[in-house]
Amino acid sequence: MPGPEVLLYGLPLAFLAGFLDAVAGGGGTITLPTLFLMGLSPAQVVATNKLLAIFGSGSATWQYWKSGHVERPLVLRLIPLALLGSALGAFLVRFVDPALFRTLVGVVILGVGALVLINKRFGLEDRYPGLTARTLALTLPGTLLIGMYDGFLGPGTGTFAMFLFSLAGFNLVRASGNARTLNFATNLGAFGLFLLGGHMVWWLGLPMGAANALGAFLGARMAMLRGSAFVKWVYGVIVVLVAARLFFGR
């Protein structure tokens, strides 16, 4: 078990992860390696990361929610599907080669990132399509797939969710708000399961969670202040980080 000195780098990295995650997802690409570096076991890393993630995703969700950047009627309908998908994904782990799947998803997320960045207008138009037959037709199956991915592997779940909501017609700020809310719900569901496992390192997860929440608060505020162009720039950075983790991380 590491000593308290690991918080000297754990807290600032958790803050940075919260900031980036609130804007474009992908915070786990920073916190997971950080927890591994501290010498925790894989079970402790996954459980403790989920503990601190609920602080960050909760903080970001609250900021977007109270500012009106969440399509509430749509997202509330999608949350049960995301939770179901996550459970299915966790079940499918035993049947699919994770290494092959990891490489495939890495290629996919690079392709998604290129599509978002090359298309100059993608996600920048100030549109609020709301709860329509079109948004449901896109987001219902998309949410199930993203939930399955979250349960199976995880890195970049929020980034994929942002792309889904952007594809449905939301600007990137509102897509981020929708994605953070969905991600908070799945984090909360997974947290309950991990809580029963008894692997959480509370004295690390709680202070890092507070730092993550502060970073998420500032990240969400910055995204809403600077708009979709800023979110798009950060999205590009996150896509590279997530792809690197999928190709080279453990």
Image (cartoon, rainbow, N blue to C red):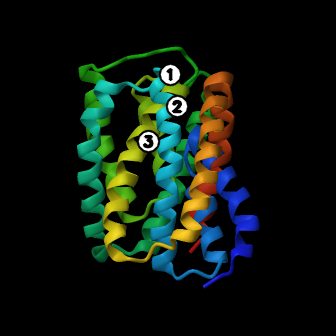
Q: Dot 2 surroundings within 10 Å: few (below 14), some, or many (20 or more)?
A: many
Residue 121 position, x and y percent, is 59, 21
Residue 244 position, x and y percent, is 64, 61
Q: Which residue is mark 1?
A: 67
| Labels 3 and 2 touching (C-beta < 8 A) | no
Q: Which mark is residue 161?
A: 3
Residue at the bottom extreme, as displayed: 1
Dot 3: element: helix
Amino acid type, residue under disc 2 in the picture: Gln
Residue at the (39%, 57%) spot, across then down: 150
Left or right: 70 as drawn, with respect to 176: left
The first of marks 3 and 1 along the sequence is: 1
Amino acid type, residue under disc 1 in the picture: Ser
Residue closest to the eye, 194 or 128: 194
| Labels 1 and 2 touching (C-beta < 8 A) | yes
Q: Which residue is mark 2?
A: 63
Residue closest to the eye, 234 or 115: 234
Left or right: 164 as drawn, with respect to 32: left
Residue 239 position, x and y percent, is 61, 48
